[in-house]
Amino acid sequence: MTRTAPAHPIARRVYAALLLLVGFVLIGGGGYLLSLGGSAYYLLAGLATFGSGVLVWIGDRRGLWLYAVMLAATVAWSIWEAGFDGWALVPRLVAPFVLGLGFLLPWVRHGLAVPHAPRQARLVGWPAFGVSLMAAVVVGAAAHAIGPHDYPDPLYEAGVANGAPHTAGRATTAPAIALVGDWLNYGNDVGGSRFSGLDQLTPETVGKLQVAWQVHTGPAPKGAKGSLEVTPLKVGDSVYVCTGYNDVISLDAETGHVNWRFRSGNDLTGRPSAACRGVAFYQVPDASGLCAQRIITNTIDARLIALDAASGRPCPDFGTNGQTDLTTGMGKVQKGYYYVSSAPTVVRGKIVLGGWVSDGQYWGEPSGVIRAYDATTGQFAWAFDMGRPNDHGQPAPGETYTHSTPNSWAPMSADPELGLVYAPTGNATPDYYGAQRRAFDDRYSSSVVALDADTGTVRWSFQTSHHDLWDYDIASQPTLVDIPTAGGVQRALVQPTKRGEIFLLDRTNGRPLATVDEKPVPQAGKAPGERLSPTQPFSVGMPSFRGPRWRERDMWGVTPLDQLWCRIKFKEARYEGTMTPPGLTPNISYPGYLGGVDWGGVSIDRDRDLLIVNSNRVGNYDKLIPRAQADAMGIEPVHEGGKGDVGGAVAQANTPFAADIRPFLSPLGTPCNEPPYGLITAVDLRTHKVVWSHPLGTARDSGPFGIPSMLPIGMGVPNAGGSITTRGGLIFIAATQERTFRAFDVRTGKQVWSARLPAGGQATPMTYWSNRSGRQFVLIATGGNASLRSKLGDMLVAYALPE
């Protein structure tokens, strides 16, 4: 005789209460979404779930039938909306089926019956539930087999190079790579290609890489918040790095042993988080002895310092005791409102640098002036002040450089032969309201400006966003490359942008080498008193990395509930595609301030004429706040010791509006749009076509509330940092939210090596040759990034083949 497990009314009613709760939330949220013109599914699914809960509460087995019908309908709706995209199906299918598993529990199952129904009818519910479960398994298996999007896709307006691997090489016509075993500039060459002529490491040998040495740069001093984002230099037998708080360290390239350490003695109190992304190297012509070779660094507290490369001693002939004050001519500068985060650029004996100006605090912030100093003496050479573009001297006593001009905080590049330095610019502060901006602000903001390296005179400029109200400042280094064509070699400049547009320009005159069209952009919803550009430049001759225009169905979540929340927020906001203007009602800005392409920039395979791009697909949820309301909320400019980071509510004082600028995330802390959030892509610079593109990174270190899922499933995650390429046919990149360093075959995009990092690799790696062991090393800084929620650290890790 078969015994039947006893029913447990309390357990059944707890389960019924859960169904009722979920159904109630879906009904409320789904009804509101429907009233906004959104999908009816959530309301209908909520009614079915709530009804099922009622029936389960009273012990009626028809609750199971109703839930099974809802599951079957959910599978059909999910495939209709999302196809077989695995990540798109996760929030639509996983949670409903997990919730339905409660019906399989014996203390729930045996408490259900169908009054006045024959036994055959009572059993109908189980086949129905089983069919739904089998459908989910089939859908899940198909989705897993297909995986997330593997591009090419309609994102790339310029098309795809037949979808085939790029294998053709050539004898490079690019300028010769000097001292191929060293890494002498932030981007290796002064043009920022991030290409190395080393070829010991190949797709066939890279799998044998192992840790050669690792070094802690040391915890930040008390009060310091600088992060380790440096790309080191390698000169001779030494590697040179700067910490986030501007100490400079010389390391033995073979062993990682510390040769010397210069302590910058920064005044760190009252300063926001900061970074030092690199130092510069300069060889004084026809000099020997102390400071003939020198390391140039700029600091959080706005000093320019020259150090002897051999000993780390300040150069006595440079400025005053080895340093120059960068606040000269700036007027009063509150702590943390001005510093230089990028490596200085050295060209024709001049050190050229811009500076980072605090985002969104007030109209009247420090100038974004670009200046040059003599690399030997540290003396002022020239200035490019947008408010007085024809006056290249320092301000007269009692005067200052023009306040609130667009700044240039990203890495610069240079062409010594042409005598040009290429400066990427940002916005005139504040970012999200621009009615007070002047004609010269609008002329040079969000542009690449070619300056005469000897005089600071503007030779040409090209603007990537007109009257920028989206924080689309150019964060990426302009990258120089010579491209062979039937008509001769093109002396090109590649300018990536946060907008996701890649502009290919003639670096001699700024004219586009790939078609750029002015296209109409959204105009509705702007703030009172604001003005908009009716059109914006779109680089239609190159692939776009801005991502496809969002639809409601593209909203994502871990569960249907947070996906529903994201859909509601999407429908509540103004969104008419890219460049939807900020205003007094919420608007979606996509890409957001992370990009597109951020400060990591791009790298070039100079042998194969391939452009390597790592990009992001994360949006912002923005809103302007009237001044009276902002004052009542206590939103004011950052004072000493304040936050001062990018994101959140910013005062924009001395304008009519503050701004609330946030990533568009669900209540669980995940992006509201579907994966992938990060991509790595190769573009043929001769045809302007995509060769291959893949999601970059897995879900291992991502999850709700920032809790790692530990699932190494390909997803494509947000990234900050850059790539390098080598003659050996490899791409090296960390950058992702996931703590992993990777190598890809540049011809196909196939991952051929990876290593787990001690912290987030939010930096650009570099590679060099050591004569001592005859090995090629690859080095990455692992400092992490709080905004990306990657683990923080202070370690440099070098990899090489076994000796």
Image: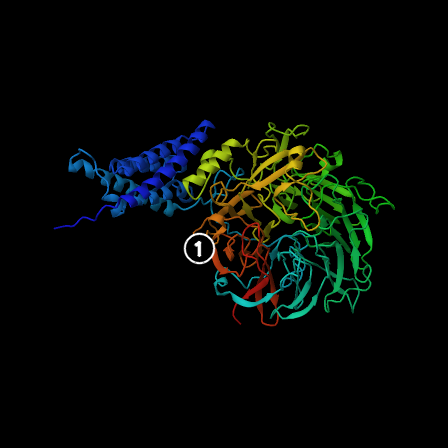
Reading the image, the residue beneath label 1 is 710
Three-letter amino acid code at disc 1?
Met
Can residue 138 be seen here?
no
Number of dots carrying numbers: 1
Q: Is mark 1 on a helix, strand or loop?
A: loop
Q: Is residue 58 left or right of residue 342?
A: left
Which residue occupies the foreground of this view, 265 or 23? 23
Residue at the spot x=82%, y=41% of the render?
A: 390
Q: Quadrant of residue 215?
A: bottom right
Residue at the spot x=49%, y=59% of the render?
A: 754
Image coordinates of residue 708 in percent, x first then y, are 47, 53
Above or below: residue 263 compared with residue 709: below
- Residue extending furthest left? 1
Which residue occupies the foreground of this view, 535 or 591? 591
Which residue occupies the foreground of this view, 567 or 590? 567
Can residue 332 be seen here?
yes
Image coordinates of residue 568 in percent, x first then y, are 48, 34
Above or below: residue 198 compared with residue 361: below
Q: In this view, does 334 lie to the left or right of 108?
A: right
Q: In this view, does 547 lie to the left or right of 243?
A: left
Which residue occupies the foreground of this view, 525 or 536? 525
Image coordinates of residue 426 in percent, x first then y, are 68, 42
Q: In this view, does 236 lie to the left or right of 144?
A: right
* Pointer 1 local density, CA inside 10 Å: few below 14, some 14–19, many at least 20: few
Image coordinates of residue 657 in percent, x first then y, are 67, 34
